[in-house]
Image (cartoon, rainbow, N blue to C red):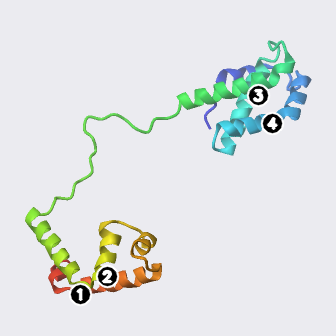
Amino acid sequence: MVTVCTSASKAATRTTSPSAYPSFASYVRARQLVLLRTARSLTANPSDAEDLLQTALTKTYVAWDRIEDHRALDGYVRRALLNTRTSQWRKRKVDEFACDELPEPETVPAGDPAEQQALHDAMWRAIMKLPARQRAMVVLRYYEDLSEAQTAEVLGVSIGTVKSAVSRALGKLREDPELTPVR
């Protein structure tokens, strides 16, 4: 774990006694859960929230003598939490780096336009061989991209009817001899 506030940590270790400020210890005991909730609202990870609160409390401890109004300690600690979190956010590691060439994905070479048109024509001929009801369902489902429920609503049939009719239509298309070379 990277220490966020090294100067505050060093200053805190220079203090002669851990109980140099008994009022600080009682403040932390009394307000720890509330301050932890505030820290959790600033981070997604509960462990990071605990670390954030610890760092903010260390900064507060170091500045304990300089804080004039101890009735406003919550505001001071909240500001320390926010400033520490902002510093962490600014120092975060950048995973993306600029480079001379963009890493573009390999493109699959497009097929021959004449072959694509021939396949398109063969598919439409096969669809035209289907009974009108099956053809309507296949067109609505796969060409118009409607859901089974939407197709059933448009045609005024049940969803089960759409499922079974489309299944039978796809079976007929799989068996069509004109589409055999495609598979």
Q: Is 28 on the left or on the right of 51, as rendered?
A: right
Residue marked by disc 4: 34
Numbered label tally: 4
Residue 175 percent coordinates (x, y):
23, 87
* Secondary structure category for the residue under label 3: helix
Residue marked by disc 3: 57
* Secondary structure category for the residue under label 1: helix
Q: Is residue 94 above or below residue 121?
A: above
Q: Residues within 10 Å of mark 3 (few under 14, many from 20)?
A: many
Pick the front one: 15 or 51: 51
**Which quarter of the image is occupied by the N terminus?**
top right
Residue at coordinates 46% horizontally, 78% vertically from top-left?
159
Residue marked by disc 1: 175
Circle nearer the N terminus (1, 4): 4
Residue 67 percent coordinates (x, y):
81, 14
Q: Residues within 10 Å of mark 2 (few under 14, many from 20)?
A: many
In the picture as drawn, the residue positioned furthest to the left comes out as: 114
Residue at coordinates 72% horizontally, 39% vertically from top-left?
50
Q: CA distance from mark 3 to mark 1?
A: 73 Å
